[in-house]
């Protein structure tokens, strides 16, 4: 089976890799690039723990082939903090206790970041809809909503 | 979970893609959004030696009205459909349905063409395309041909497409004045398939009688199910509550679901009846306002 040379930009940094066709994007990030902030949860495109932003859209990286991301820009949770300063969404999750075990948090935050880039002033309903593909088994979502609202206010 | 090994191809034109499909025969599969195909490969429910990725072929996506038809490119993402003002204003049946497909992350990748061409009776857009009277445009080695949506689905995961044909576009006739459509879906949770769902598209004449009507059911058998008897019963009638109830009963009689964790056969058929009634009611209200 032929391998494919791919180039991607991960959190602003150009990266290259030689990948098997069947390598999943989440495994490229975790196992080839050793960026383990992106989690594997259900591995069946239900839970959203593996969410990354691919060319502006949040997607489940367990259900995208690494080779499909060739030439794309990817944002992972490692790319949210800038110059030692937390992203407003990260700050919101801290301030509003938007996490307990933390397993869903990277995906939850990336869906939230993508929402706020599209919609500066989302209603509670819009926030709930935007994170509908990310499952949290700890918080009951209430504090996650508050965290996103906190970030929205901070970013306006 | 890791798929079994396969060769990945990324053609840059439709002809190149069709050539690959022809060359590799049944061993090749088209990869569009991948939201059904990649889980199938990962779970090893199926395997293909060759994936032909059509994501980078120019001109396969887009939503536009032209020459009396709404043209939806096969590679149009569900999220693009969901955010389209044109769809929101003029195609409420799609505006109802798309936010209920999977979840927002899946809709960012999943395509309309994939939903329609996969042949999964649990997918929502096949029944909708049947209700809308859509024509499916396919390209193969011999050129382009069109297939009516209600003739497209032949069996479970089996469609009129040959293995070397690609669905390129869906053409929906622009609904006439006094038209209304609706999609009603019952699902247990975000990301779930329908326990039952009903698509209705109808048009009223000047006197308020139903001039044209099509009804189709999702997840009610091995293929999407067109409820022709119910539609025929309604045409020519000025509908009242009793007519709608009777039509809903006729539509549900066509439902032939299998019992599973989403409910028994009886439950699903009863839900099809209830949803058909609601979809007809909503479509009529919308047609009245149109």
Image (cartoon, rainbow, N blue to C red):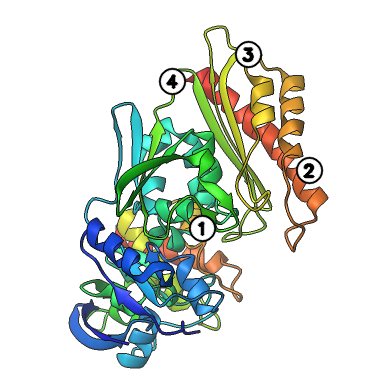
Which is nearer the eye, B181 or B19?
B19
Q: Nearer the viewer, mark 1 or mark 3?
A: 3
> Tag 2, which chain?
B
Query: What whole-number distance in Å separates the C-alpha atoms at marks 3 and 4?
Result: 16 Å
Residue lying at 59% horizontally and 23% vertically, measured from the top left: B284
Quadrant in which the C terminus of chain A is drawn: bottom left
Q: Secondary structure at mark 3?
A: loop
Q: Nearer the viewer, mark 1 or mark 2?
A: 2
Evaluate if marks 1 and 2 touch, with contact meaning CB atoms under 8 Å apart: no
Q: Nearer the viewer, mark 4 or mark 1?
A: 4
Q: Secondary structure at mark 2?
A: helix
Residue B270 has which mark? 2
Q: Residue B25 placed where, x, y %?
A: 39, 68
User: In the picture provided, is B85 more to the left or to the right than B190?
Assistant: left
> Tag 3, which chain?
B
Residue lying at 46% horizontally and 53% vertically, measured from the top left: B117
Depicted B191 relative to depicted A103: above or below: above
Between disc 2 and disc 3, whose residue precedes?
3
Dot 3 corresponds to which residue? B236
Depicted A31 relative to depicted B27: above or below: below
> Tag 4, which chain?
B
Evaluate if marks 4 and 2 touch, with contact meaning CB atoms under 8 Å apart: no
Residue B176 has which mark? 4
Query: What whole-number distance in Å separates the C-alpha atoms at marks 4 and 1?
Result: 36 Å
- Label 2: how many residues lie within 10 Å, few (<14), some (14-19) or many (20+)? some
Asked whether the residues under marks 2 and 3 belong to the same chain, the reply is yes
Which is nearer the eye, B82 or B264?
B264
Asked whether the residues under marks 1 and 2 belong to the same chain, the reply is no
Query: What whole-number distance in Å separates the C-alpha atoms at marks 2 and 3?
Result: 26 Å
Residue lying at 35% horizontally and 63% vertically, measured from the top left: A114
Q: Residue B282 placed where, x, y %?
A: 60, 29
Asked whether the residues under marks 4 and 2 belong to the same chain, the reply is yes
């Amino acid at each position: 089976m032929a391998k494919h040379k791919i180039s991607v930009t991960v959190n602003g940094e150009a990266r290259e890799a030689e990948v098997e066709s069947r390598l999943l994007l989440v495994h490229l990030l975790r196992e080839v690039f050793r960026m383990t902030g992106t989690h594997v949860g259900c591995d069946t495109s239900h839970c959203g723990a593996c969410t990354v932003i691919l060319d502006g859209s949040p997607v489940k990286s367990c259900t995208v082939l690494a080779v499909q991301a060739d030439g794309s820009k990817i944002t992972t949770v490692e790319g949210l903090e800038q110059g030692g300063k937390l992203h407003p969404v990260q700050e919101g999750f801290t301030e509003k206790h938007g996490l307990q075990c933390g397993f869903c948090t990277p995906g939850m935050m990336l869906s939230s970041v993508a929402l706020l880039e599209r919609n500066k002033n989302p209603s509670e309903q819009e926030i709930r809809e935007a994170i509908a593909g990310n499952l949290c088994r700890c918080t009951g979502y209430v504090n996650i909503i508050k965290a996103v609202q906190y970030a929205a206010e901070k970013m306006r | 979970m890791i798929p079994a090994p396969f060769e990945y191809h990324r053609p840059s034109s439709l002809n190149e893609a069709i050539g690959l499909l022809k060359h590799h025969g049944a061993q090749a599969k088209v990869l569009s959004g991948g939201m059904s195909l990649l889980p199938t490969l990962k779970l090893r429910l199926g395997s293909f030696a060759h994936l032909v990725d059509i994501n980078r072929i120019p001109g396969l996506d887009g939503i536009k009205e032209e020459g009396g038809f709404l043209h939806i490119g096969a590679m149009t993402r569900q999220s693009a459909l969901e955010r389209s003002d044109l769809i929101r204003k003029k195609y409420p049946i799609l505006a109802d349905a798309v936010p209920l497909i999977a979840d927002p992350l899946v809709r960012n990748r999943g395509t309309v063409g994939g939903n329609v061409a996969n042949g999964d009776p649990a997918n929502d857009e096949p029944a909708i395309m049947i209700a809308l009277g859509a024509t499916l445009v396919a390209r193969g080695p011999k050129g382009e041909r069109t297939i009516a949506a209600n003739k497209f689905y032949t069996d479970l995961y089996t469609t009129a497409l040959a293995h070397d044909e690609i669905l390129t576009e869906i053409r929906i006739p622009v609904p006439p004045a006094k038209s209304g459509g609706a999609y009603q879906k019952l699902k247990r949770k975000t990301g779930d398939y329908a326990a039952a769902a009903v698509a209705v598209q109808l048009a009223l004449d000047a006197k308020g009688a139903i001039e044209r009507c099509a009804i189709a059911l999702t997840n009610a058998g091995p293929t999407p199910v067109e409820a022709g008897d119910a539609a025929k019963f309604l045409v020519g009638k000025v509908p009242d509550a009793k007519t709608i109830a009777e039509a809903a009963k006729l539509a549900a009689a066509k439902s032939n679901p299998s019992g599973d964790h989403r409910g028994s056969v009886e439950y699903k058929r009863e839900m099809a009846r209830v949803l058909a009634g609601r979809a007809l009611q909503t479509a009529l209200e919308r047609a009245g306002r149109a």
